[in-house]
Amino acid sequence: MRQRKLRNLDTKYEAYSDIIVDSPAEMKGRWSERSGGAPLFIEIGCGKGKFISELAAREPEHFFVAIEGNKSVMLRAMEKIRKFGLTNVAFIPELAGDLSDWFEEGDADGIYLNFSDPLPKNYWYKRRLTYRDRLKSYFRVLKPSGTVTFKTDNTDLFNWSVLEIIASDLKILDITRDLHADPEANASNIETEYEAKYSGFGEKIKRVVIGRK
């Protein structure tokens, strides 16, 4: 179900001004000031924030940047961060374009892509977050050891993405086509709202971790 646009968003956002980055391009080269020098991780499309809030609570020594283009949805994520008293998360209320516009080379230690829009029409393929040019762009802002973790229930998107990884001359570090049935892989997994819902319907969750060759 699509999230309804909430009323008085600007007024509601004022309460979260301390964790919102309205001009991310101005932060380029300055993220260490915001993170206090902590390792930095990015989630593209944080949704209602179940994943990022639980991850930030589990890893207080890390700093997280959550990107979300739907401001009504992002409000729910910020509410969770505030509810749990977390101080290691910042939010960018925009659609993610080229991360190099916002981050310097080597700024990030990891990027998470959770249940990205599959954009099923063939002519939309360049807009998918796992398109080969997008994948290459992520590694421009990642440290040499940095990784991209992609998780989805969509089999067609997953299979297509694996081919894009290969075409990008990147390395598959870990892969599973049934995450919840793999005790080792699932041990540290944090479910998103979407994941919890659709795995309950019997959908198999796929995950791949991508690094440099």
Image (cartoon, rainbow, N blue to C red):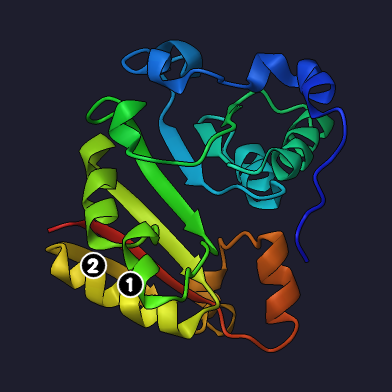
Is residue 177 visible from the viewing direction of this image? no
Mark 2 crowd level (few <14, some 14–19, many ≥20, 10 Å Cα): many
What residue would you read off at disc 2? 165
How crowded pointer 1 is (Cα within 10 Å; few <14, some 14-19, many 20+) is rated as many
The residue located at (53%, 29%) in the rendering is 61
Please state the total of marks drawn on the protein image: 2
- Amino acid type at circle 2 is Ile
Q: Quadrant of the C terminus?
A: bottom left
Comparing 43 with 38, the one in front is 43
| Residue 98 position within the rendered picture, expressed as x and y whole percent measured from the top left | 32, 39
Q: Which residue carries the number 1 mark? A: 161
Q: CA distance from mark 2 to mark 1?
A: 6 Å
Side of 172 relative to 10 (left or right): left
Q: Is 33 situated left or right of 104 in this image?
A: right
- Residue 124 appears in the rendering: yes
Residue 65 in the image: state x and y as whole percent.
52, 33
Amino acid found under the numbered disc labelled 1 = Ser
Relative to 15, say whether 64 is above or below. Answer: below
Using the image, determine if residue 127 lies above or below residue 157.
above
Return the x and y of residue 181 as percentages of the image width and height.
57, 85
Direction front: furthest residue:
123
User: Residue 196: which disc?
Assistant: none
The secondary structure type at the circle numbered 1 is helix
Task: Place residue 77 in its image quadrant.
Answer: top right
Contact? badges 2 and 1 (CB < 8 Å): yes
Q: Is residue 138 left or right of residue 200?
A: left
Q: In front: 76, or 101?
A: 101
Would you say 8 lies left or right of 78 here?
A: right
Q: Is residue 209 above or below residue 120?
A: above
* SS class, disc 2: helix
